[in-house]
């Protein structure tokens, strides 16, 4: 077997290890003097590397959005990430809405006008393959009376 044949065979066999499965977490919430907090965090076991892609948020009234990482682990209210492609398996990460995550390191604060929206490029943000629920990413709104839509797209590296 030639060296090139061996390399091609190795690449073919390694391809499934490089596969990435995309997931989405989406929540529309009607709030009355309250905030919405969406958290995506690593589980305490069987973690995979999570690579974020984008997040979209819109508010029907003026609101302030805060993006954070690595707050104290959330424990409520569990939401299941949805695979983007039919037939893909369940995500290993935990997602929470109306999350009780502790305040983490602030990455960004943005104020939106009424009926405003923002799309974040999150391609530089990762949760490393560590079984640590304190490794998380959160989008937090200010307390509002109105409707907020939050969508987060990420992928898991199958390792």
Image (cartoon, helix red, strand yellow):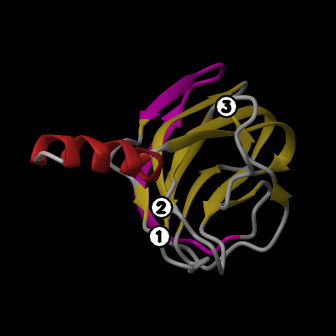
Does dot 2 land on a helix, a strand or a loop? loop
Q: Is residue 85 above or below residue 7?
A: above
Which residue, as the protein is rendered here, is positioned at the far left? 3
Q: Position of residue 153 (x, y in %)?
A: 57, 37
Select label 2 or label 3 by which is in front. 2
Q: Nearer the viewer, residue 97 or 82?
A: 82
Of mark 1 and mark 2, the one earlier in the sequence is 1
C-alpha span from label 2 to label 3:
19 Å
Of mark 2 and mark 3, the one earlier in the sequence is 3
Does dot 3 land on a helix, a strand or a loop? loop
**Can residue 119 be found in the magenta stretch?**
yes
Which residue, as the protein is rendered here, is positioned at the far front? 1
Q: Which residue bears the numbered disc 2?
A: 159
C-alpha span from label 3 to label 1:
21 Å
Q: Position of residue 83 (x, y in %)?
A: 70, 38
Q: Position of residue 119 (x, y in %)?
A: 48, 28
Does dot 1 land on a helix, a strand or a loop? loop
Of mark 3 and mark 1, the one earlier in the sequence is 3
Q: Which residue bears the numbered disc 3?
A: 84
Residues at discs 2 and 3 in contact (Cβ within 8 Å): no
Q: Nearer the viewer, residue 121 or 110?
A: 121
C-alpha span from label 1 to label 2:
9 Å
Q: Which residue bears the numbered disc 1?
A: 129
Residues at discs 1 and 2 in contact (Cβ within 8 Å): yes
């Amino acid at each position: 077997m030639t060296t090139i044949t061996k390399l091609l065979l190795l690449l073919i066999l390694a391809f499934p290890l490089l596969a990435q499965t995309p997931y989405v977490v989406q929540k529309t919430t009607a709030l009355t003097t309250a905030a919405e907090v969406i958290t995506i965090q690593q589980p305490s076991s069987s973690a995979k590397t999570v690579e974020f892609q984008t997040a979209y948020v819109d508010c029907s009234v003026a609101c302030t959005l805060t993006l954070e990482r690595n707050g104290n682990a959330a424990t409520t209210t569990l939401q299941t990430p949805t695979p983007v492609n039919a037939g893909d398996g369940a995500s290993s990460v935990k997602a929470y809405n109306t999350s009780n995550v502790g305040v983490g390191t602030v990455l960004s604060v943005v104020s939106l006008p009424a009926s405003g929206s923002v799309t974040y490029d999150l391609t530089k943000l990762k949760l490393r393959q560590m079984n640590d629920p304190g490794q998380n990413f959160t989008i937090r709104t200010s307390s509002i009376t109105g409707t907020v839509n939050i969508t987060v797209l990420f992928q898991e590296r199958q390792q």
